[in-house]
Image (cartoon, coloured by chain):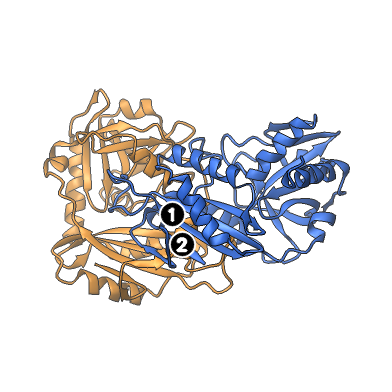
Chain colours: A blue, B orange
């Protein structure tokens, strides 16, 4: 099911700057029992991203109403919300009057085995590196060729995620997830001021860890730091938290820190965290 | 006028990976007297770009035939050719069977005053920096947010181009052009192994300069190098070569090196270069 600027359909103008230049942003949101999960957080990030790109953010009431229209009756699904700078002429210069496009679509919830969350997943390192750009870092924009190339690197269904480094060799995130590690009872995740996507579950984990007295440290770290970690996990809005039990030849245990964060997130989602 | 996968139209699937992720490439080609200029060079770059992104390049005979269909009878126009990885499901992973989309469109030729080419243009430095990524450097792909943000920085019609630096402070190119400078009778342009677009006119200038015995040096250079140059010019497939007569407060002459390259390019285009 898809709504394009409020109308049911599946086509957009080829002249839309989303198609011409990847000139826009998106959100990927879990839907449970007809309701978008962490919707306020997603809309807040969308608004901040629009501001960074200079795209007027569509009226949040309209987004809310269209979201409700699409999600009604959906037990378990994925909602994708795309905002672009709208139709424009040839050339990079934004049109004088920007009329953003909005594309909302729902998709089946992926059929991930439950043991990914309980027993962990297997990951690999990607050869494709993340470029550095402070102006775009953190923003979930539509320029996603780096992730596309990284995800195209493997076809082995035993491997659930690829870990990406930036061009300076710092570990940043997974192709579709943010990454955390625990070492000596402390939690770490990558600083996202040069590259990466500032994920909603990442934001919530950082907030919850502070609230519960074991704050996450955001820092630059290397492949060696990661391989010497006690625990590693990845997260996003669809999977929640997946422990990593293996990266290339290195094995990890699903440890107490990871389980504690999973519990905190679960409780927060139930409204009693 | 627009052809989408061979059919006249103006709409594409919102599920096209061009729209979802900027997962594709484009070419912008001058059309004169019904013929696309430097078409072979554009198709060659497109083919190389497709290979780098892992997109099967559409049959060149089909592209040629659709191009002829669109350009017939056009005196002076711009042809834009977009190739994407085609329609796919949600998620970065490319579909198992890739059916690339092609969108060919023609546009009015911009109404640039003749004196831009003879007396030069005014340029500025952009605050938006180019990120570094060897895997994407040189490719004219659809992830163009950096250029969009840079071009949105100014609205003064007296300024025709913005010059972009990379995140390390090297001068790379204009928002829509490549950039050359002359110093002590030698020609220089940026090395494009970390960022930038490997423009067709840039390729031709490098080839012609070698042929005529004054080879261009590709190197990393700084803002100071540029401001201390004797001559500066920018180029692309639509404008040809424009000398720069002013960057911010600094003035330049339209010198002999620039005029010589303009003459070489003109002769090459006439088929006697």
Subunit of mark 2?
A
Residue shown at 20% from the left, 57% from the top? B268
A52, B45: nearer the viewer? A52
Question: Element under label 1?
Answer: strand
Which quarter of the figure is the N terminus of chain B placed in? bottom left
Residue B87 badge: none
Residue A200 x, y percent position in the rendering: 63, 44
Residue B36 found in image quarter: bottom left
Residue A202 seen from this side: yes
Sequence-first tag of 1 and 2: 2
Within 10 Å of disc 1 (Cα), the crowding (few <14, some 14-19, many 20+) is many
Residue A212 x, y percent position in the rendering: 79, 32
Residue B136 seen from this side: no
Question: Element under label 2?
Answer: strand
Image vertical order of residue A14 relative to residue A198, above or below? below
Q: Horizontal placement of B161 versus A65: left or right?
A: left
Within 10 Å of disc 2 (Cα), the crowding (few <14, some 14-19, many 20+) is many
A151, B134: nearer the viewer? A151
B255, A188: nearer the viewer? A188
The residue that mark 1 highlights is A102
The residue that mark 2 highlights is A3
Image vertical order of residue B174 relative to residue A72, above or below? above
Task: Farthest residue to the top: give it.
Answer: B249
Residue A209 found in image quarter: top right
Q: Horizontal placement of A236 versus A56: left or right?
A: right
Subunit of mark 1?
A
Q: Horizontal placement of B25 versus A15: left or right?
A: right
Cα distance, mark 1 to mark 2?
8 Å
> Do discs 1 and 2 belong to a common subunit?
yes
Residue shown at 83% from the left, 42% from the top? A260
Residue A124 x, y percent position in the rendering: 72, 55
């Amino acid at each position: 099911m898809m709504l394009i600027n409020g109308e049911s359909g599946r086509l957009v103008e080829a002249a839309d700057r989303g198609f011409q230049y990847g000139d826009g942003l998106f959100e990927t949101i879990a839907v449970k029992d007809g309701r978008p999960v962490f919707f306020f957080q997603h809309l807040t990030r969308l608004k901040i991203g629009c501001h960074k790109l200079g795209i007027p953010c569509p009226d949040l009431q309209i987004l809310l109403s269209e979201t409700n229209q699409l999600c009604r009756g959906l037990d378990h699904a994925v909602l994708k919300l795309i905002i672009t700078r709208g139709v424009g002429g040839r050339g990079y210069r934004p049109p004088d009057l920007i009329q953003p496009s909005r594309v909302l679509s729902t998709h089946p919830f992926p059929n991930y085995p439950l043991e990914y969350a309980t027993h962990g997943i297997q990951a690999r390192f990607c050869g494709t590196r993340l470029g550095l750009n402070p102006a775009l870092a953190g923003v979930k924009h539509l320029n996603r060729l780096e992730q596309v190339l990284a995800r195209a690197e493997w076809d082995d269904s035993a491997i659930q995620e690829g870990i990406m480094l930036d061009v300076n060799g710092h570990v940043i995130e997974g192709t579709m997830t943010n990454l955390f590690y625990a070492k000596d009872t402390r939690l770490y995740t990558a600083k996202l001021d040069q590259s990466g996507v500032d994920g909603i579950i990442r934001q919530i984990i950082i907030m919850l860890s502070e609230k519960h007295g074991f704050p996450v440290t955001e820092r630059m770290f290397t492949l060696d730091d990661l391989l010497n970690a006690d625990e590693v996990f990845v997260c996003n809005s669809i999977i929640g938290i997946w422990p990593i039990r293996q990266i290339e030849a290195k094995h990890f245990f699903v440890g107490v820190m990871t389980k504690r964060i999973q519990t905190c997130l679960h409780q927060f989602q139930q409204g009693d965290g």
